[in-house]
Each structure stands twice: as structure tokens, then as C-alpha cells.
Amino acid sequence: MDQQAQRERMGDTDLDIEEELLGEAAFTVTEGTERLNRTWIELIVTGLFGGIDIGLGILAMILVKQATDSDILAGMAFGVGLLALKMAHSELFTEEFLLPINAIVAGQGTWTQLFRLWSVTLVCNLAGGFVFAWLTVLALPDYHDTLIDTAYGYLYPESVGTMIGLSLLAGATITLSTRMQQGTSNDVVVALICMISGLLVIGLGMLHGALNAIVIFGAMLAGASITVGDFLSWFVVVIPLNMLGGLLIITLPRLLRTRRILSAVRRGDLSLEDLEKEAS
């Protein structure tokens, strides 16, 4: 018996592919299409609250870090920000890379829409994060030194290689974390994933442009000797590496895994309605 016949014999659907992959394809294409077609207001507000929600995690992080001097415990506390993103349905840059790309490959969106989604999300994340950083500095003067020390650690890693590696890992970790959350409807599991992801990103000092920027903004507002030029020279290196980490390490392999389904939708051999029916 050849491979195709074996797959057809074992499958419960009319398509020659595993049910789990059908479910993944149906979900990612549908959700990705919705994101690509958000109105400008929806896109801006979702991005702004992404920065504000993750700011809650930054607040928890500096609280625990100053109290315990432990990056690991601070990272676990930071997970509350990732949980806030999930519960509030806001969006963080690099968080949902897989969804819109799958929708485009399936012919349900354009690359122009993708550029609009990513660019507006990033800018609005930074704007929302800046507002939250300003409030944090205004309200918590006793935490200024912690903000400044943490920001210096992000801006000046040990070496160029360390900077590249930590940036790639940050993009991959955040993208994988949100993809794992989409695979479960159990709130306890979601909270656990957020806590572990925070532990890794903050505990290991990973460099994520949108996350770290909030800390750096706070440090600048608190009086650190960090200029706008210092921030921008760091930012233009970290952000592309975050994108590469999320796209090449996480998104591309999963895209290849469901390519046959996405191609069928793109050609018109399979409608989104039929795909959702097969997945269910």
C-alpha cells in the first residue's frame, strides 16, 4: 500500500491529510483573514492596547525584580502581561505571524494588507507602551533604578553574537507561545504557557523590540543617559531579527506542513466553508 492510500485509509475526512492539520489550517486562515481585514480604528486600538496590556507585565516584572533580584521570578511575573494580551484579544508585534501569512498563501489577503497590519501594530504597540511607561515612572519613583539597570542590559548586550541570538530567540518564543495558546481552550494551560514564556523571555534577557522598548522608554523618562539615537540604533537591529526568528524558525515550518491545504484553497479547489466543515 502506497503512502497516499495509507493516509486515506487512516483518515476520517475526505481530504488526504490528518485532521489536526485541517483544524490548524482552517483556524489560521480564518483568523488571519479577519486580522488582515480589520478597519483602521480596530487595528489602531488593538495595537495600542497590545502595548498597554504588555505594560502590565512590565509592571509586574520590575516589582518582583526589585523585591527579589531574581530574573527568573521576574520573568514568571511578566507572564501576566502575555495573559492580558490573550484575555483582552489585543495584539503584540511578532505575536501572530503565522495567521496572516497562512491567509495570504491561501489567497485570502494581500502582502499590502500584511504590511499595514504589521507596521500599524508595531507603531501602536510603541505608542501604548510609551504611555504606560510614563505612568509607571510618574507613579513609582522608587523603581527608577530598576528600570534603568534593566534598560541598560537590553541596550548593551555582551557581544554582537549575543544580540543576534537573543533577538532571534525572542521573536521565535513569542510567536510559538501564542501559537501554543491557540491550540487549547483550557484557561489554566493558557496561563501556564504565559508564565513559562515570560520566564524564558525575561529570565534569559531576550531582546524583543516591542517589549524591551517599554522598559527603555521608562528608563529614558526616569533620567537615564539614553538618547533617542541610542534607542533607534538598537531598535533597527532587533526588530528585523525578531521578525526573522518568528518567521523562519516558527512560521515557515508550519506553513510547509499545511501547504497542500492552503494551495487547494488558493486554487479554488477547496472553499473556506468546506475546509471548516472538514476540520469539524
Image: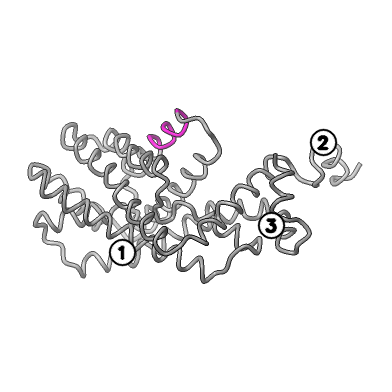
Total numbered labels: 3
What color scheme is it?
one colour
Question: Gap between marks 3 and 2, in whole Å?
Answer: 21 Å
Identify residue for label 3. 262
| Amino acid marked by disc 1 | Phe
The crowd level at tag 2 (other Cα within 10 Å; few <14, some 14-19, many 20+) is: few
Q: Which mark is residue 235?
A: 1
Q: Position of residue 85 (x, y in %)?
A: 38, 44
Task: State left or right for residue 117 relative to residue 5.
Answer: left
Q: Nearer the viewer, mark 3 or mark 2?
A: 3
| Amino acid marked by disc 2 | Met
- The residue positioned 44% from the left and 51% from the top of the image is 95
- Please tell me whether the stretch drawn in magenta is mainly helix, strand or loop: helix
Q: Are marks 1 and 3 in contact (CB under 8 Å)?
A: no
Seen in the picture, residue 97 relative to 79 is either above or below; the reply is below
Please say whether residue 225 is one of the residues in the magenta stretch: no
Q: Nearer the viewer, mark 1 or mark 3?
A: 3
Task: State left or right for residue 137 relative to residue 242.
Answer: left
Question: Gap between marks 1 and 2, in whole Å?
Answer: 49 Å
Question: Gap between marks 1 and 3, in whole Å?
Answer: 34 Å
Q: Residue furthest top?
A: 188
Q: Residue furthest right?
A: 1
| Amino acid marked by disc 3 | Leu
- The residue positioned 70% from the left and 51% from the top of the image is 273
Identify residue for label 2. 10
- The residue positioned 21% from the left and 34% from the top of the image is 64
Seen in the picture, residue 261 relative to 279 is either above or below; the reply is below
Which secondary structure, mark 3?
helix
Q: Nearer the viewer, mark 1 or mark 2?
A: 2
Task: State left or right for residue 5 relative to residue 165.
Answer: right
Nearer-N-terminus badge (3/2): 2
